[in-house]
Image: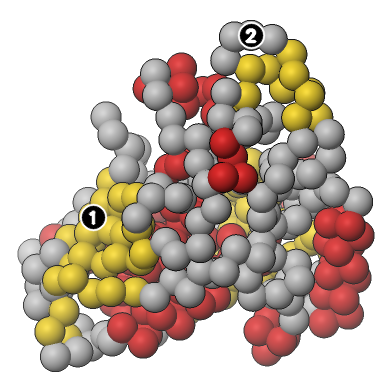
Amino acid sequence: MSGNSFGDALKITSFGESHGVALGCVLDGVPAEIRISAAEIQLELNRRRPGQSKITSPRDEKDRVEILSGIFDGRTLGTPIALLIRNSDARSADYSKIKNIFRPGHADFAWEKKFGLRDFRGGGRSSGRETVARVAAGAVARKILDSRKIKITAFAKEIAGIVGEKFDPKNISKNLVRAADSAAAKKMESAIIAAKNSGDSVGGVIEIRIQKCPAGLGAPVFDKISARLGAALFSIGGVKAVEFGAGFGAAKLRGSEMNLRGGGIAGGITDGSEIVVRLAVRPTASISLPQKAVDSRGKIRKIQISGRHDPCLVPRIIPVAEAMVALVLADFLLASRLDRI
């Protein structure tokens, strides 16, 4: 099992490493004659790319998409779509001094035990840079959803314990943290900068709202749409918890209360109402504070990670989360054509 492919009617296979030549994906199952351009895919990639602000990694990747196949004259051909994003600003030397040390909070040890060999340059395929391929594929999936007017909106609900109480979608693109509450956004930004200046990092919560999703998407029993969305969102590095609707709060409600808060999904199938999903995102594992670690010979070592890292993952995970939701919904939407004759 490679674990590098996802989806049924719409399948994505991603490839590439953080410091390799390029990353990309092959997207199979996209119907023909969907209008899409490289510029539309680029818009989504620009939202995810590093080096955008003082609260993101300064790695200067332009993330320019190259369409290798499946799109001609601005329309999909119905054949596999291959998208490529080249790496241009990798600094592998930042990792050469710690190549034999397993970084705390990272996948280094687990990957070496599984494969016997790992790409130590920025974590290789376990790096968050892998998600650039998902965002490119998600941009195509969004075009499928546009035909049904399905809207996906994700934003920073909480960062460093600061919670946004107001929801104004117009604010999301107007602040660095992508919060829907402008007042909370300023406090969140300050908290991220304070953590960065101290050599540390912070986590947060992302909320996703899905509107105008038609009823009937999902399948019993093991392929509930909540199960597939959960799997898709948990596949994003740094996501430690996922909840739908009332989520963990449901444990405190009575049935008479919970029955009125279905959250857009009933029996694992969409009911046509708004779907609300939240993700808990851990603080970034790569921090510059001195830490203890174990090396490949089992010895305790002191480590201080250099390189360029996000002091908070939340702002850049937001477009990734939207992409994964789009891929799941598009997959179910295409599969639903076979549910009834």
Residue at screen point 63% across, 31% down: 98
Q: Position of residue 118 (x, y in %)?
A: 43, 29
Choose between 296 and 127: the one closer to the eye: 296
* For residue 3, above or below residue 52: above
Q: Position of residue 86 (x, y in %)?
A: 36, 64
Which colouring convention does the figure follow? secondary structure
Q: For residue 298, which numbered disc appears in the image?
A: 2
Which mark's residue is nearer the viewer, 2 or 1? 2
Q: Is residue 221 left or right of residue 167?
A: left
Q: Position of residue 299 (x, y in %)?
A: 69, 10
Q: Residues within 10 Å of mark 2 (few under 14, many from 20)?
A: few
Q: Is residue 302 left or right of residue 169?
A: right
- Rounded to the nearest angstrom, the CA distance separating label 2 from label 1 is 40 Å
Q: Position of residue 271 (x, y in %)?
A: 44, 65
* For residue 173, above or below residue 341: below
Sequence-first tag of 2 and 1: 1
Q: Residues within 10 Å of mark 1 (few under 14, many from 20)?
A: some
Amino acid type shown at disc 2: Gly
Q: Residue 58 occupies which quadrant of the picture? A: bottom right
* For residue 194, above or below residue 77: above
Label 1 SS:
strand
Give yes or no for contact between labels 2 and 1 (Cβ–Cβ under 8 Å).
no
Which corner quadrant holds the N terminus?
A: top left
Task: Kindly tell me whether residue 183 is visible in this rendering.
Answer: yes
Residue at screen point 26% across, 85% down: 36
Amino acid type shown at disc 1: Lys
Instruction: Name the outermost residue toward the top.
Output: 298
Q: Residue 114 occupies which quadrant of the picture? A: top left
Residue to which mark 1 is pinned: 11
Q: For residue 60, which numbered disc appears in the image?
A: none
